[in-house]
Image: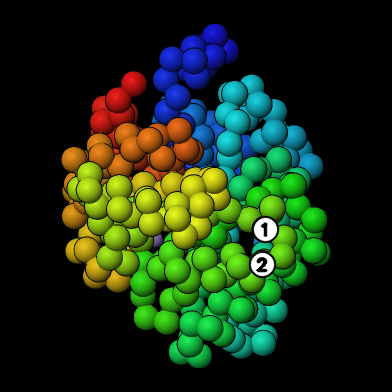
């Protein structure tokens, strides 16, 4: 407890990883602590299917207890892979909406602060259609779930038909949403870089974040995903790389995480765990780059 209190007073770094819930959801807290995370992200269920198994009362209590004891103030959940709230297709949009509502409710049950969702794909029907589908899904889900949890829209890498890789698109979505108090933004560094935003040089970072601030407003930025990018600037490739081993590089991350707009925000890595390295390697690099 004392150690955690001191960490908070001396060093504000809120850094963590997307950890597994395998076995039982509360085990995610143990995994986060094992990695010395001060915040973390989870899927509340298997991310690869449409169906979610019901949360057991016992694991919900354990999860809440453990994170409270750990002194972790911000936990983030990520939507599963299949839903696409920008979908122009009636059936898949309805299914996506249902899963968004379910997920908001699960987050409230677990006491999770933020739910991150990819903005989605318009599947060829055009950006205007995508934007209005997203805004409609957000408002409807908030009306149905009345969540305590705040929904965060994550910027996209700019893959074909994607919605929300440009700040201008995100602004248009926010302008259409009525329940704006329940909505915020999560920025992913890999997606930014792939979409053509230079988050590597000091000047590029300043320009990107000032752009974000003037279009969307800094107060709406709640979480950042720290992932290096395997693809080059503007490549539109959503491929995460270990911190320092991608095109953004160590110096890029040093510049980014120490920026005054970023340094106090919760930061989460979603880097691969492979032969080149693991979470503990990426987290320790980031800690070494952070200026206290
Ligand atoms: Zn994501
Ligand atoms: Mn991300
Ligand atoms: Mn990604």
Q: Is residue 150 visible?
A: yes
Determine whether label 2 and label 1 are within 8 Å by CB: yes
What kind of element bears circle 2?
loop
Checking the image for residue 177, the label placed there is 2
Residue located 54% across and 60% down the image: 153
* Mark 2 within 8 Å of ligand 1, using the beta carbon: no
Rendering coords of residue 65 (x, y %)? 69, 28
Q: Tell me: 89 left or right of 81.
A: right
Rendering coords of residue 204 (x, y %)? 24, 52
Rendering coords of residue 166 (x, y %)? 40, 68
Viewport quadrant of the C terminus? top left
Neighbor class of circle 1 (other Cα within 10 Å; few <14, some 14-19, many 20+) is: some
Checking the image for residue 275, the label placed there is none
Q: Tell me: 121 left or right of 176.
A: left
Q: Is residue 84 visible?
A: no
Rendering coords of residue 85 (x, y %)? 60, 73
* Mark 1 within 8 Å of ligand 1, using the beta carbon: no
Q: Is residue 111 above or below residue 284?
A: below
Measure the alpha-carbon separation of dots 2 and 1: 6 Å
Q: Which residue is mark 1?
A: 180
Q: Tell me: 189 left or right of 71.
A: left
Q: Is residue 87 above or below residue 272?
A: below
Residue 67, located in which quarter of the rendered image? top right
Q: Is residue 18 above or below residue 86?
A: above
What kind of element bears circle 1?
helix
Quick one: which residue is furthest to the front in this view?
214
Viewport quadrant of the N terminus? top right
Front in this rendered view, residue 181 or 45? 181
């Amino acid at each position: 407890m004392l150690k955690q209190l001191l960490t908070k007073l001396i060093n504000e770094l809120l850094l963590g990883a997307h950890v597994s819930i395998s076995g039982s959801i509360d085990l995610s807290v143990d995994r986060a602590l094992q990695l010395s995370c001060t915040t973390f992200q989870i899927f509340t269920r298997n991310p690869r299917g449409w169906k979610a198994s019901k949360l057991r009362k016992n694991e919900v209590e354990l999860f809440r207890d453990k994170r409270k004891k750990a002194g972790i103030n911000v936990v983030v959940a990520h939507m599963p892979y299949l839903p696409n709230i920008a979908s122009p297709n009636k059936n898949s949009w309805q299914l996506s909406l249902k899963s968004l509502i379910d997920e908001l409710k699960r987050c409230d049950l677990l006491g999770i602060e933020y739910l991150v969702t990819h903005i989605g794909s318009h599947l060829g029907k055009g950006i205007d259609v995508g934007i209005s589908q997203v805004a409609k899904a957000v408002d409807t889900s908030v009306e149905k779930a009345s969540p305590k949890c705040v929904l965060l829209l994550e910027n996209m890498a700019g893959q074909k038909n994607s919605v929300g890789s440009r700040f201008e698109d995100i602004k248009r979505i926010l302008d259409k949403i009525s329940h704006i108090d329940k909505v915020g933004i999560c920025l992913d560094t890999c997606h930014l870089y792939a979409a053509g935003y230079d988050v590597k040089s000091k000047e590029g970072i300043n320009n990107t974040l000032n752009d974000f601030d003037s279009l969307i407003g800094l107060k709406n930025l709640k979480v950042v995903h720290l992932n290096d990018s395997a693809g080059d600037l503007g490549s539109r490739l959503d491929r995460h790389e270990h911190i320092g081993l991608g095109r953004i590089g160590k110096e890029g991350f040093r510049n980014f995480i120490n920026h005054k707009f970023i340094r106090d925000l919760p930061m989460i890595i979603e880097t691969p765990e492979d032969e080149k390295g693991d979470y503990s390697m990426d987290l320790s690099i980031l800690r070494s780059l952070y200026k206290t």
